[in-house]
């Protein structure tokens, strides 16, 4: 929508009877409905208020007319200049979303909305608006030509502004399309015209408008003295505009300096000006390493982008504010911050550091587990006591069971008593056998039968005669001689049977003595001859009973008198009556299978079996299962001779195995878990070796284990993941982490006494594999907890970057505002000598005082703003963007577009076509 479509203007247009677009051209000097033009509408003599409103309306009207004149003057410039200006205007229209400018038949430069009408149409629009406004207020409408100095003054200023607006709009449009980077990288003309507009369009327009206003004011002042319609007036107009433009710059500088001086004197602690801003930006750019080629100006756009894209730690850790170095990670800025944190700005940096430390502590401490670390040790100790007690009870019970199992296997009495028991049983059995033999012989009753002695002597002599002398030497000669002495007398069978019995006794004795085999053989031969004699001299009935007796005797001999037989050996005695075998050796003789069978065959009594069983068991070590099993394997046949003994031995072996297993388990637990006075070998035992106050040392044992994950699992598995134990483990781990990642120096503590966290140490601690796996085990039911802590640690890596830039910075001392004593003294001396006057003396001292005040205020402002920029990255980004040295250089370029109005004036003065209409000039310019 064009400016002429505004609702107010449209309403005014309707009030005068239709659209202003359709109004006829107003001829110079014609004022519709003016006094005198229509007697019916002549107003009364206006009062002072109406006159004031009319004067104001006239001034405003002439200002608008001047703008319109300036626009049409520039658009009507001939030749190449006019075409360039028109091209810029068309380009600005395109950027505004309007079609290309074309002059239509009605005299408009015709984009949509009739943005740029010709001068006549502009005048027509202004007149229509003026008429409507005057009609509403009931006052006289303004004249079409300036009637007094204010109107002429405003008209000339408006002309300069209008002439400047046309190229300004085009340049702003071109700059918008080209962009800052394109304008900066273009040629010299691009940097001269486009770059300021691309950097800050509003400031560009303001600067150009301000200078154009000053030029207009200077030209208007010149026109009040010289007639502009003359050649001299044109020159005066040009000179006045130049002087006005220059005076604008001077006035602006004087105003700035006056404002700076006032601020320096009245508000030093808040003093800020462009010099301060520029100095701070230069310091930051220099520290940031924005190096440029010789003659070029640094561009802080890249640093602004770096700040805006830098880390926002506060989004992760609420309350943390990163500094400029933290945001940019630039080592040069870090060095600048480090140098300033110990200067006058130390308080601000220290406050930021402590505030950040408090925020970090709040964020991290919010993740800290509750409760003491001693909970883990308490739970471990309780479980250790329970397991050791269970193991001890099991071992004690198993030992009791084993004792009861082996108790029946313990041999009773001594080996001698057991041997005596066996010997007594054998002797009793032998006596019983002998009694049976005697009974058998008594039943045969042949002892009293008479026999001829010569027959017995012949049998003896015949048998002895067949023997050699050596053999005869082994016979009982005295006994045989007594038998021979019976010859011629009467003998009875008893002599023969007694001889036989004696020979048998001698034979048994010979068989039991070493080397008595031959003697036994000789005795047996003679005994057999005597026995045959007896058999031939008795009746058949007697012979039958005698055979029975002899069988009994044979059985007795087989059982007790067999040479080399263990039974016989056990029964043999020395001639004095002492047993040949010691009592303690008797039972041992019968522990092998054959001898045991021989013994049991002769004397199978409970006492004998108990004695042999005890003697057999005396050779077994029942203290160990393997020895019981070894004994059972080596004496399997003997054991089987005693029903139930194998089961007893097997049960005893099993009981000893259980006893050994439970004892070994108890010993293993004691070694692994340790005790109150002995260090254990397992992770639990090592942990419990430390007291409640040594949880950090204890948890270090877990972390430094060959397999930290397994060690951590062992701790928690030991207590069944008890909530108290898990919380205690987490707390112990947390305290160990704090000891490694918090500062500990006396000078590092905050005002609240808390030591700050070290972000890099915290990240390194959490990234350490052994620490990470232990933390994961302790927080296996809540892995997000560790992850949140790791996120905080990662976010904090960009914090306090300045500590890595330890480069010393120069420092200065504060300077006073008043002139130094030397300055005052030199000025007074000059005054006393008459070299200077009093006014100069006062003004000189005032200038020095002001300069020193501004310099001191600026120095303070630079320090203050630099600290603020370093501590507040977002403010620094805004400062670097608005005071970019490259942009500053572009915006510092002097305004140039106001020359357009002067070019128009010069060309018009030189043109021979002064009478041509403005529309013709515009048409020729466009063509």
Image (cartoon, grey):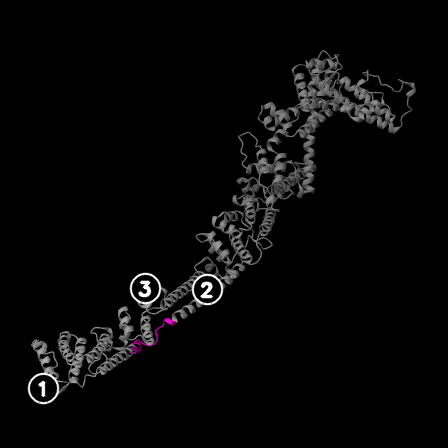
Mark 1 element type: loop
Residue toward you, 757 or 88: 757
Front of the two marks 1 and 3: 1
- Magenta segment, which residues? 408-421
Mark 3 and mark 2 lie on one chain; the one further toward the N terminus is: 2
Residue placed most toward the observer, 179 or 218: 179
Q: Is residue 381 visible?
A: yes
Q: Disc number at residue 391?
A: 2
Using the rendered image of the protein, determine whether residue 224 is visible from the camera's viewpoint: no
Quadrant assignment, res 822? top right
How crowded pointer 2 is (Cα within 10 Å; few <14, some 14-19, many 20+) is rated as many
Q: Please give left or right for residue 540 compared with residue 697 in the image.
A: left
Q: Quadrant of residue 639?
A: bottom left
Q: Which residue is mark 1?
A: 487
Is the residue marked by circle 3 packed among few (<14), some (14-19), or many (20+) residues within 10 Å? few
Q: Is residue 416 magenta?
A: yes
**How far across and how far down the image is residue 287, in percent?**
55, 38
- Circle 3 residue: 633
| Structural distance between the alpha carbons of marks 1 and 2 | 94 Å
| Quadrant of the frame with the C terminus | top right
What x and y, as percent, mark residue 475? 12, 79
Q: Is residue 33 magenta?
A: no
Q: Nearer the N terminus, badge 1 or badge 3?
A: 1
Q: Nearer the viewer, mark 1 or mark 2?
A: 1
Whether residue 769 is situated above or below residue 655 in the rendered picture: above
Q: Position of residue 505 (x, y in %)?
A: 18, 80
- Given the current orientation, which residue lies at the most extreme front position? 540
Q: Nearer the viewer, residue 81 or 437?
A: 437
């Amino acid at each position: 929508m064009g400016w002429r479509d505004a609702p107010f203007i449209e309403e005014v247009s309707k009030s005068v009877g239709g659209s202003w677009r359709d109004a006829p051209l107003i001829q110079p000097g014609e004022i519709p409905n003016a006094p005198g033009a229509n007697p019916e509408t002549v107003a009364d003599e206006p009062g002072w208020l109406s006159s004031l409103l009319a004067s104001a309306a006239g001034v405003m009207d002439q200002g608008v007319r001047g703008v319109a004149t300036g626009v049409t003057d520039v658009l009507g410039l001939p030749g190449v200049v006019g075409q360039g200006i028109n091209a810029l205007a068309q380009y600005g229209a395109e950027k505004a979303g309007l079609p290309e400018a074309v002059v239509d038949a009605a005299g408009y430069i015709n984009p949509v909305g009739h943005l740029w009408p010709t001068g006549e149409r502009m005048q027509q629009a202004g007149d229509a608006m003026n008429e409507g406004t005057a009609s509403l207020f009931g006052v006289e409408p303004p004249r079409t030509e300036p009637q007094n100095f204010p109107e002429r003054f405003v008209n000339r200023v408006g002309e300069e502004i209008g002439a400047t607006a046309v190229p300004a709009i085009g340049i702003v449009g071109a700059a918008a399309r080209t962009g800052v980077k394109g304008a900066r990288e273009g040629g010299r003309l691009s940097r001269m015209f486009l770059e300021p507009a691309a950097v800050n369009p509003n400031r560009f327009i303001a600067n150009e408008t301000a200078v154009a206003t000053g030029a207009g004011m200077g030209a208007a002042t010149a026109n009040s003295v010289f007639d502009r319609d003359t050649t001299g007036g044109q020159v005066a107009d040009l000179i006045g505009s130049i002087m006005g433009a220059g005076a604008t710059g001077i006035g602006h500088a004087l105003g700035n300096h006056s404002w700076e001086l006032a601020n320096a004197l009245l508000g030093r602690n808040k003093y800020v000006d462009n010099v301060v801003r520029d100095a701070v930006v230069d310091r930051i750019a220099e520290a940031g390493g924005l190096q440029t080629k010789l003659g070029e100006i640094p561009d802080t756009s890249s640093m602004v982008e770096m700040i805006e894209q830098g880390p926002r730690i506060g989004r992760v850790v609420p309350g943390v504010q990163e500094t400029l170095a933290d945001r940019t990670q630039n080592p040069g800025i870090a060095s600048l911050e480090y140098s300033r944190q110990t200067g006058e700005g130390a308080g601000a940096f220290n406050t930021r550091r402590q505030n950040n430390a408090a925020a970090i502590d709040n964020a991290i401490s919010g993740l800290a587990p509750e409760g003491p670390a001693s909970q883990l040790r308490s739970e471990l100790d309780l479980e250790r006591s329970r397991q050791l007690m269970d193991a001890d009870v099991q071992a004690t019970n198993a030992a009791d069971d084993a004792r009861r199992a082996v108790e029946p296997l313990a041999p009773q009495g001594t080996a001698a008593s057991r041997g005596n028991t066996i010997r007594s049983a054998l002797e009793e059995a032998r006596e019983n056998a002998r009694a049976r033999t005697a009974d058998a012989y008594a039943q045969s009753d042949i002892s009293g039968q008479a026999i001829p002695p010569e027959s017995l002597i012949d049998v003896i002599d015949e048998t002895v005669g067949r023997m050699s002398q050596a053999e005869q030497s082994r016979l009982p000669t005295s006994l045989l001689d007594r038998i021979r002495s019976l010859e011629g007398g009467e003998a009875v069978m008893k002599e023969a049977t007694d001889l036989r019995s004696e020979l048998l006794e001698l034979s048994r004795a010979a068989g039991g003595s070493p080397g008595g085999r031959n003697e036994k053989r000789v005795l047996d031969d003679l005994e057999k001859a005597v026995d045959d004699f007896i058999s031939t001299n008795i009746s058949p009935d007697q012979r039958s009973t005698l055979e029975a007796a002899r069988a009994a005797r044979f059985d007795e001999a087989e059982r007790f008198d067999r040479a080399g037989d263990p039974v016989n050996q056990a029964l043999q005695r020395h001639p004095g009556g002492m047993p040949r075998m010691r009592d303690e050796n008797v039972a041992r003789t019968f522990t092998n299978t054959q001898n045991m069978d021989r013994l049991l065959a002769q004397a199978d009594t409970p006492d004998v079996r108990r004695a042999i069983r005890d003697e057999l068991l005396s050779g077994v070590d029942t203290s160990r299962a393997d020895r019981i099993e070894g004994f059972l394997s080596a004496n399997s046949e003997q054991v089987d001779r005693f029903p139930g003994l194998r089961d007893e031995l097997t049960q005893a072996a099993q009981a000893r195995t259980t006893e050994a297993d439970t004892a070994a388990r108890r010993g293993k637990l004691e070694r692994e878990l340790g005790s109150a006075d002995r260090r254990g070998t397992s992770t639990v035992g090592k942990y419990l070796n430390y007291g409640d106050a040594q949880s950090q040392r204890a948890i270090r044992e877990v972390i430094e284990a060959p397999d930290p994950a397994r060690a951590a699992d062992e701790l928690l598995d030991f207590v069944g993941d008890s909530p108290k134990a898990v919380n205690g483990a987490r707390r112990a781990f947390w305290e160990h982490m704090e000891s490694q990642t918090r500062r500990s120096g006396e000078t590092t503590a905050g005002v609240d006494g808390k030591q700050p966290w070290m972000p890099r140490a915290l990240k390194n601690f959490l990234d350490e594999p052994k620490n990470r796996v232990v933390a994961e085990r302790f927080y296996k039911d809540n892995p997000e907890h560790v992850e949140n802590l790791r996120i905080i640690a990662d976010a904090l890596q960009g914090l306090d970057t300045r500590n890595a830039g330890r480069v010393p910075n120069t420092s200065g001392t504060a300077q006073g505002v008043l002139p130094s004593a030397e300055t005052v003294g030199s000025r007074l001396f000059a005054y006393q000598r008459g070299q200077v006057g009093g006014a100069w003396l006062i003004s000189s001292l005032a200038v020095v005082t002001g300069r020193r005040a501004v310099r001191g205020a600026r120095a303070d402002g630079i320090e203050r703003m630099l600290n603020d920029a370093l501590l507040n990255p977002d403010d620094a980004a805004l400062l670097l963007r608005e005071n970019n040295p490259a942009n500053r250089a572009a915006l510092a370029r002097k305004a140039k577009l106001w020359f357009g109005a002067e070019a128009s004036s010069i060309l018009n003065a030189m043109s021979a076509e002064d009478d041509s209409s403005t529309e013709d000039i515009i048409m020729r310019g466009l063509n």
